[in-house]
Image (spheres, grey):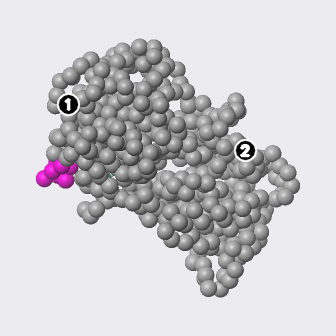
Amino acid sequence: MNAFSSLGLCGPLVQALSDQGYTTPSPVQRKAIPHILKGKDVLAAAQTGTGKTASFALPILQRLSESSPAGAGVRALVLAPTRELAAQVAERITAYGSGLSLRAAVVYGGVDMEPQIAQLKKGVDVLVATPGRLLDLLHKRELTLGGVETLVLDEADRMLDLGFIDAVRKIIAQLPAKRQNLLFSATFAPAVVELSNGLLVDPVRVEVSPANSAAELVQQSVYEVDWDDKPDTVRYLIEEGRWSRALVFIRTKKSADDLVAYLVQEGVAAAAIHSNKSQILRTRTLDAFKQGEVRVLVATDIASRGLDIAELPLVINYDLPRVAQDYVHRIGRSGRAGAEGRAMSLLSTSERKWLEGIEQLLKRPLTPEPLPFYDNGVEQPVDLSSANALGIAGKKTIKTVVRKSFKQKRNAPRKPDAKKGRVATKKPRARAGQSSSRKPSRGVKGTVEGSTPSKAQSPAAAPNKSNAARPAKPRRPSPWGHSD
Ligand code: AMP
């Protein structure tokens, strides 16, 4: 018997999973699906990357396909904190439900409401929504929630962090009292427990992993780098390591734009994703990154929440997050679905206190290492014993090796732009220490994601695939094996 059928899932769902290449349920799927199928409330501690979406989507689809509507309108409602997560969850639900005649839709802000209204009018069984847009639609009386049989709060901790609690409570007030409730959260922080106490009835608790489990699948390095050397270091790591793709996290929207401008100027296809970008642009940028047209995606924490990018080999922390938990979320973008990942963090002197917080959360030290050397894209082993004063060794490396590597490149004949077949033009660039509008500013000067937005809108970088980029590793078919 197929491992998914033994959880009680029906033929069309098992078939859809097999079409996706999924043969083995993940731990959260094994633990949650049988309870959700029975109609129980579930409180699950599971991060993105654990297969949590399928763990609620599959049993919800099955239950809906087996029963007739209890009321009018939407029958299952999934609330997600960000637009990207909502879009991805809806996309997964559509894929898993391809063999069933159920209709799924997604509504989120930042885009025209009319097409969403038109879709709702056609009838929707499963609705995925961000709280703000759903409230707007409810105020306009464009849908009714009186027929909701199952409510899912996805990434509930993030929902609370982002201040959606009032909106969530207003939405819940419009649901029928008798319903199934599922709450998924990366952590059981006190605020999450409080929310769940008022929401869930006799819930089954599912806890697949401690908060830092994603981090265990990812090889992590910390490099001490002067703040002004960070743009060069990012470029060095990506180019010399011949990474096919990298996601760079950065704290402020302005420094994200500046880093992208710098990388593009240096011939690296890069684009930024943050909350000042229109939703259409964010979606387009993400698609270009997933297609491999954009090699480096520079993202702020909020915009990147919930991003599910298969085969993301490298995450770089341009700066260290102030909230230690964000470090785990950031590096968890790599090494998803059980695959191995790589995370590199650039540490400037002023960020040591943030590193300590991260070490406390991970319950292990993250000792700075010298910057890696690469030979034809292959990282060379570093003799740590000879690299005394490790941090200093790291700083020396960037001053000598990194710049030497760029100098050699500058003297080498130009490579044509892979996509457009033209020679990339290179503008003169300010050296470190000189002011340059193209270099990212110090994080403190920019606008932190989530604070007052500006009107700036810049398009994604022109796609430019590097000839030197190595292909992404093939995905492993059964990432979770059979053990918990
Ligand atoms: P999630 O934690 O829901 O964001 O899922 C993480 C990734 O794992 C997504 O790309 C899913 O499509 C994928 N995934 C979910 N379930 C399985 C499975 N049983 N086997 C392999 N991959 C899966």
In the image, 92 versus 411, the foreground residue is 92
Q: Amino acid at mark 2?
A: Gly
Q: Residues within 10 Å of mark 1 (few under 14, many from 20)?
A: some
Say whether residue 420 is visible.
no
Check if residue 391 falls in the magenta segment.
no
For the magenta stretch, what is the residue range? 1-7
View extreme (bottom): residue: 386
- Asked if residue 197 is positioned above or below residue 347 in the image, the reply reads above
Pick whichever of labels 2 and 1 is earlier in the sequence: 1
Q: CA distance from mark 2 to mark 1?
A: 49 Å
- Which image quadrant for residue 85? top left
- Which image quadrant for residue 156? top left
- Asked if residue 4 is positioned above or below residue 131 in the image, the reply reads below
The spot of residue 259 in percent (x, y) is 70, 49
Q: Which residue is mark 2?
A: 446
Label of residue 260 in the image: none
View extreme (right): residue: 434
Name the side, left or right, on which 454 lies relative to 54: right
Q: Residues within 10 Å of mark 2 (few under 14, many from 20)?
A: some
Q: Look at the numbered disc 1 and give the secondary structure of its residue.
A: helix
Q: Which residue is mark 1?
A: 65
Q: Which residue is found at the position 38% from the left and 38% from the top?
A: 153
The spot of residue 392 in percent (x, y) is 73, 75
Name the side, left or right, on which 225 lies relative to 209: right
Q: Amino acid at mark 1?
A: Ser
Q: Look at the numbered disc 2 and give the secondary structure of its residue.
A: loop
Name the side, left or right, on which 313 lies relative to 156: right
Q: Which residue is found at the position 70% from the left and 30% from the top?
A: 455
The spot of residue 82 in percent (x, y) is 49, 37
Q: Which residue is found at the position 42% from the left and 55% from the top?
A: 336
